[in-house]
Amino acid sequence: ALDLLSLMSDAKVIPNHITYSAATSACEKGGQWQLALNLFSLMYEANVVQTQISYSAAISACEKGGQWQFALHLLSLMPGSTVAPDKITYSAALSACEKGGQWQLALDLLSLMPHAKVVPDEITYNAAISACEKGNQWQLALHLLSLMP
């Protein structure tokens, strides 16, 4: 994916947000979170608009790489860039918190979703429940289960 991206400029084809997002997702799937973040930052430098999809791909790459701090940082940048987080970006950030053993932060994110006009779904609740489970917070996990739609 990275080779194809570099060949595009040689062929005088300008990469767009779809191209960058696909390459970022490929890095995520390959466990290359650093490369994914590098591509994400290259979008800004290349004046390519970062979208919900590109943010989600970068946050997911951080989640897969166990980099919950970077995932939360990216999520925090979204409102300033006029890109609103959606269920997918929140779910990726919640999963990053879960993998990082940050159950309190996962619950904080879940509680912020309605304020951001994002309705939690089964995937976001499952990520928060898993975070509570990893933090030995079974009472909170049961409470979240009772709140699920």
Image (cartoon, rainbow, N blue to C red):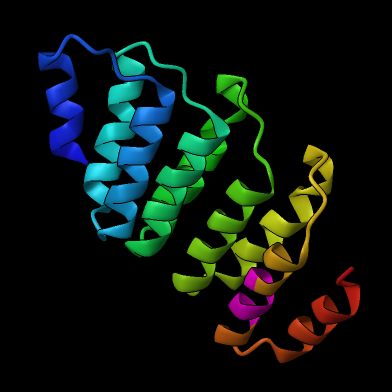
Q: Is residue 121 magenta?
A: no
Q: Quadrant of residue 91?
A: bottom right
Q: What's the magenta region?
A: 127-132
- Residue at image point 65% right, 38% down: 85
Q: Residue furthest front?
A: 11
Name the image quarter holding residue 142.
bottom right
Front position in the image: 8 or 134: 8
Q: Residue at x 73, y 58 (%)?
A: 110
Q: Nearer the viewer, residue 108 or 86?
A: 86
Q: Is residue 7 left or right of residue 71?
A: left
Q: Is residue 136 above or below residue 37?
A: below
Q: Is residue 90 above or below residue 52?
A: below
Residue 25 position, x and y percent, is 37, 47
Q: Position of residue 105 (x, y in %)?
A: 60, 61
**Which residue is pictured at 76% across the width and 48% down the height?**
113
Quadrant location of the N terminus in the rendered image: top left
Residue 128 forms part of the magenta stretch: yes
Main SS of the magenta part reads helix
Q: Position of residue 56 (x, y in %)?
A: 51, 44
Residue 62 horizontal/vertical position (percent): 38, 54
At 18% from the left and 38% from the top, the residue drawn is 2
Left or right: where 72 falls relative to 70: right
Which quadrant of the rendered structure holds the C terminus? bottom right
Instruction: Give the tally of numbered discs.
Output: 0
Is residue 35 toward the left or the right of residue 63 in the image? left
State the residue in front, 24 or 81: 24
